[in-house]
Image (cartoon, helix red, strand yellow):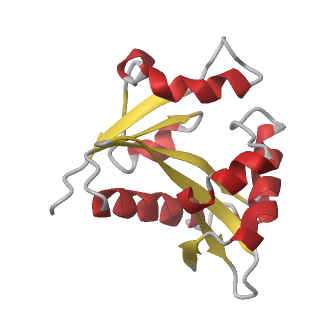
Amino acid sequence: MIRKAAITDIKAIHGLLQKYGSKGELLPRPLSELYDHLRDFSVYVDDKNRVIGCCALQFCWENLAEIRSLAVHPDHMRKKIGSKLAEASLREAKSFNITKVFTLTYRPEFFKKYGFVQIDRSQLPLKIWGDCLLCIKFPDCDEIAMMKEITPYE
């Protein structure tokens, strides 16, 4: 089941992001930042309400949002949990009349399934690069920027 994250989910979200962040597969987030951005997160929970996946939709501008921090516990891979979280984020973006959603990823094939296309990072607003200063790969970013245009009133 997917639901909006609760304050009690933050440590589980942090653990998931640390698993992939330590391998350089996504940007790890400090606990303080996760508490600050709690409302951005949705979680996928099992029947015992344990967090096994997470995804954030962060608004960047009046018509632009980012899908970020999409992670699924390694024991639950290949069960379409990441797909369900991505789809939920796109529906949420649409509900806010967002017309463009982007992501920075090492898994472009995953996002291509949802209509994202690769773009040059220079097409993204400078505002989003503040988080890059926290990244261990800065300034030599090798993530792939992808964008999807959506029609909010369909």
Q: Position of residue 73 (x, y in %)?
A: 75, 61
Left or right? Give the position of 49 relative to 18. left
For this orientation, the residue located farthest to the left is: 154
Quadrant of the snapshot with the N terminus: bottom right
Quadrant of the snapshot with the C terminus: bottom left
Classify 87 as above or below 110: below
Q: Position of residue 137 (x, y in %)?
A: 72, 19
Classify 62 as above or below 35: above
Classify 75 as above or below 132: below
- Quarter assignment of residue 9: bottom right
- Quarter assignment of residue 51: bottom right
Q: Position of residue 101 (x, y in %)?
A: 37, 43
Residue located 37% across and 51% down the image: 114
Residue located 66% across and 12% down the image: 140
- Quarter assignment of residue 87: bottom left
Left or right? Give the position of 1 relative to 31. left
For this orientation, the residue located farthest to the top is: 139
